[in-house]
Image (cartoon, rainbow, N blue to C red):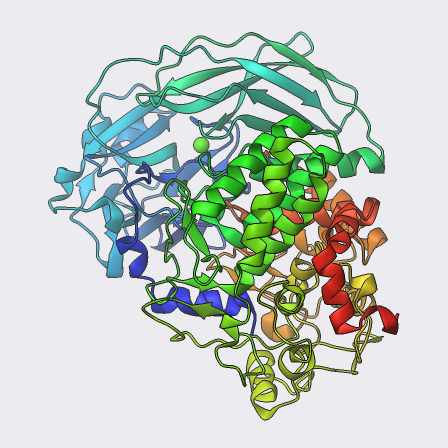
């Protein structure tokens, strides 16, 4: 069973615990019901219907969005409708709930911005109600009562006290806003709505004093990255970005949240153009500060090598600039919970930072300071027989049971991902100075203290067990059984210098032939293919030596092999570079064949794996049952070592043809589902770094070389007798 599968189960069982586990350190968020649709044409998080002679403009029951009229660039909701006598229309604009963001500023008002083109439209404005949990909704109000004095042909803020809906409403419980026909008219009417949010009463009228300052700008092919000094003033609500092309006027092109220090601006297909940029701040009342100084950039045609640099650099930002500040480690997702770090994703991020130093994106000195912060934090953080939990509070180092109260202890798999990164760092920081020595020594202590043998649960067990906690002990009782992403866990357990498990467990546990292991694989894959660990079947013309079903999601071929060089892993069944390559090729060929006829799929749009989805986080696989039409950029891009040509083709397609919607300041957004006109609003900690690391392994083998050079890794290789089989 994959981690993702387990995580989803835990999520469902313990969903209510999310709310209880919020820490005081978490800054409450303003609940925004609509800022921008992530894709043009229509807004996924909506539901538009009409009946009788009425009508509301929509695409597949999703309300239309427009570019060209926006209060917060890039788009707004377009209400175009007929409110007929014998009919009705209805639009629900729904909250896109971000993973982990569930701690909100208690609101007093519903606020949005409206743009009306014609005075007479005011007479045909809809009624509103608030959609609550459990399909409940509030009393209705007439929008016209709040808009009567609004000017036409300009954006106007409408503020409606929540009290007007005649219920006591908790912000947490608000799921959306329902707009529905009130008047009668056979005319087509139109207005625009933007930035729907739930605001507290503004207690202060003080304005932002801080002066915005751009500090870097870089032109690429089709886009410009601008960066600014981190925003300190907590009154800043948005950073507003302006672009000037040639001798034209400055144009307002986007907004950015103040906790992200830059913006990626797509400027169109033509190359070698010059642009000027400036920024300003908006405060909580949307008052604008004066603008920054202007910086200039020029776009230019790029080589494939330059493209790879660009992709590595942007995805790395998630772990460098986007890190939790106290620990220096990786957040679970951005936007998301700002105080909670994910230990496995942090291990991946550590390796991405090393790439950043190697490629000159980050100085050695800055990286050393970061690793001192990371290792000092980790040495004081919660551990359970030396094993880190899945999630830690970045300010206290205490466990955050984000997946529920049972998951409040050590997570052996996440710890193995973290250790893979730390051992790579121990090798990388090899200078004989006090700082790098401290980094190496702290890593050695953390690594040697992991009690892999404890997680075997009892001396006779053939398996490693995923979780243990002081009060729950082995309640979750999830045995690690391959094939999946956990080979690194078995490998490190065998390689450990102080708490190793016998090398025989590789075959008796990870690759077990027992009935229990077979049942486990059949239950996970819903097929007998691969139930004995080895597979041997041919899928899309490719024989698969090892793997359940037809190989599973692609992250199985990434997470364990960021450091562990699959070229060197040859067991009784296969060589794992070859096996991973087959899994990637099967995935590619499935996407070319595209049996479910999803939009976009092809030899330049492929790579099914685990990611955020329209409904939830889910692992997609190259088979009919597990393909939901959602494409995840990390699938193809982290497969560069296995499928360089097809990965490059996907990279170029994602960037050149989908970049405007799919590529942002931290690299590619997590996933896109074209059939649903949905794109994830998230960057995921588990998915950005493997792109950086695996592209580097393709380009130079850097991380593979560093990790494999560890003396303890070498000892593990000897114990497993892998080298002899090559
Ligand atoms: Ca907007």
Which corner quadrant of the image does residue 625 belong to?
A: bottom right
- Residue 149 visible, this orientation: yes
Ligand 1 falls in quadrant? top left
Q: Is residue 347 left or right of residue 43?
A: right
Q: Is residue 601 above or below residue 279?
A: below
Residue situated in front as seen by the camera: 503 or 592: 503
- Residue 329 visible, this orientation: no
Q: Is residue 547 above or below residue 145?
A: below
- Residue 237: x %, y % from top left: 38, 25
Residue situated in front as seen by the camera: 127 or 599: 599
Q: Is residue 137 left or right of residue 511?
A: left
- Residue 336: x %, y % from top left: 43, 44
Residue situated in front as seen by the camera: 297 or 377: 377
* Residue at 48% over, 77% down: 457
- Residue 257: x %, y % from top left: 45, 30
Q: How many numbered callouts?
A: 0
Q: Quadrant of the N terminus?
A: bottom right
Which corner quadrant of the image does residue 80 belong to?
A: top left
- Residue 550: x %, y % from top left: 71, 76
Residue situated in front as seen by the camera: 154 or 33: 33
Q: Quadrant of the C terminus?
A: bottom right
């Amino acid at each position: 069973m994959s981690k993702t599968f387990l995580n989803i189960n835990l999520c469902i069982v313990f969903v209510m615990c999310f709310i209880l586990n919020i820490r005081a350190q978490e800054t409450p968020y303003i609940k925004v019901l609509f800022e921008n649709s992530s894709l043009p044409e229509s807004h996924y998080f909506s539901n538009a219907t009409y009946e009788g002679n009425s009508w509301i403009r929509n695409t597949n029951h999703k309300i239309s969005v427009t570019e060209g009229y926006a209060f917060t660039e890039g788009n707004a909701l377009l209400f175009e409708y007929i409110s007929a006598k014998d009919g009705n229309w209805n639009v629900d604009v729904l909250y896109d709930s971000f993973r982990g963001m569930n701690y909100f500023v208690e609101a007093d008002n519903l606020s949005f911005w409206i743009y009306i083109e014609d005075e007479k439209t005011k007479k045909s404005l809809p009624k509103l109600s608030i959609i609550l949990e459990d399909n409940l909704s509030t009393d209705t109000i007439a929008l016209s009562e709040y808009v009567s004095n609004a000017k036409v042909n300009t954006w106007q803020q409408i503020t409606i006290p929540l009290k007007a809906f005649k219920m006591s409403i908790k912000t947490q419980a608000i799921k959306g806003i329902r707009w529905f026909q009130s008047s009668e008219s056979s005319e087509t009417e139109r207005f625009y709505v933007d930035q729907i949010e739930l605001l507290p009463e503004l207690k202060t009228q003080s304005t932002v004093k801080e002066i915005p300052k751009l500090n870097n700008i870089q032109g690429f092919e089709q886009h410009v990255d601008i960066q600014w000094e981190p925003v300190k003033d907590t009154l800043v609500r948005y950073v507003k970005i302006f672009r000037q092309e040639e001798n034209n006027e400055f144009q307002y092109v986007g907004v950015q949240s103040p906790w992200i220090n830059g913006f990626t601006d797509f400027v169109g297909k033509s190359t070698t153009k010059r642009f000027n940029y400036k920024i300003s701040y908006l405060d909580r009342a949307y008052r604008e500060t004066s603008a920054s100084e202007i910086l200039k950039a020029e776009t230019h045609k790029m080589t494939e090598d330059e493209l790879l640099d660009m992709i590595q650099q942007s995805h790395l930002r998630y772990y460098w600039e986007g890190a939790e500040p106290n620990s220096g480690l990786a957040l679970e997702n951005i936007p998301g919970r700002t105080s909670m770090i994910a230990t496995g994703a942090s291990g991946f991020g550590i390796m991405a930072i090393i790439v950043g130093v190697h490629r000159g994106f980050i100085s050695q000195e800055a990286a050393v300071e970061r690793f001192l912060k990371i290792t000092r934090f980790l040495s004081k953080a919660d551990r359970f027989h030396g094993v880190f939990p899945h999630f830690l509070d970045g300010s206290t180092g205490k466990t955050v049971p984000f997946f529920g109260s049972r998951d409040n202890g050590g997570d052996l798999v996440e710890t193995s991902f973290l250790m893979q990164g730390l051992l790579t760092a121990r090798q990388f920081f090899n200078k004989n100075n006090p700082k790098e020595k401290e980094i190496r020594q702290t890593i050695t202590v953390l690594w040697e203290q992991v009690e892999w043998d404890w997680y075997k649960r009892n001396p006779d067990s053939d398996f490693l067990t995923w979780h243990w906690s002081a009060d729950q002990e082995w309640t979750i009782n999830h045995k690690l059984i391959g094939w999946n992403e956990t080979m690194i866990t078995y490998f490190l357990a065998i390689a450990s210098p102080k708490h190793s498990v016998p090398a025989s467990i590789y075959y008796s546990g990870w690759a077990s032939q027992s009935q229990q292991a077979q049942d486990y694989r059949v239950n996970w894959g819903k097929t007998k293919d691969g139930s004995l660990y080895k597979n041997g079947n041919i899928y899309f013309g490719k024989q698969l030596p090892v793997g359940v079903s037809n190989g599973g999601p692609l992250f199985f071929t990434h997470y364990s092999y960021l450091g562990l060089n699959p070229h060197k892993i040859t067991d009784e069944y296969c060589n794992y570079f070859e096996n991973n390559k087959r899994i990637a090729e099967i995935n590619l060929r499935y996407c070319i064949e595209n049996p479910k006829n999803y939009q976009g799929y092809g030899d330049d749009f492929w790579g099914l794996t685990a990611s955020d989805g329209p409904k939830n986080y889910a692992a997609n696989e190259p088979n009919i049952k597990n393909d939901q039409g959602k494409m995840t950029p990390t699938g193809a891009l982290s497969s560069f070592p296995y499928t360089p040509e097809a990965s490059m083709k996907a990279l170029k397609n994602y960037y050149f043809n989908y970049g405007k919607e799919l590529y942002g300041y931290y690299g590619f957004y997590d996933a896109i589902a074209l059939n649903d006109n949905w794109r994830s609003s998230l960057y995921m900690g588990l998915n950005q770094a493997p792109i950086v690391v695996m592209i580097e392994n393709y380009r130079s083998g850097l991380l593979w070389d560093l990790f494999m050079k560890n003396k303890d890794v070498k000892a593990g290789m000897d114990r497993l007798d892998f080298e002899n089989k090559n």
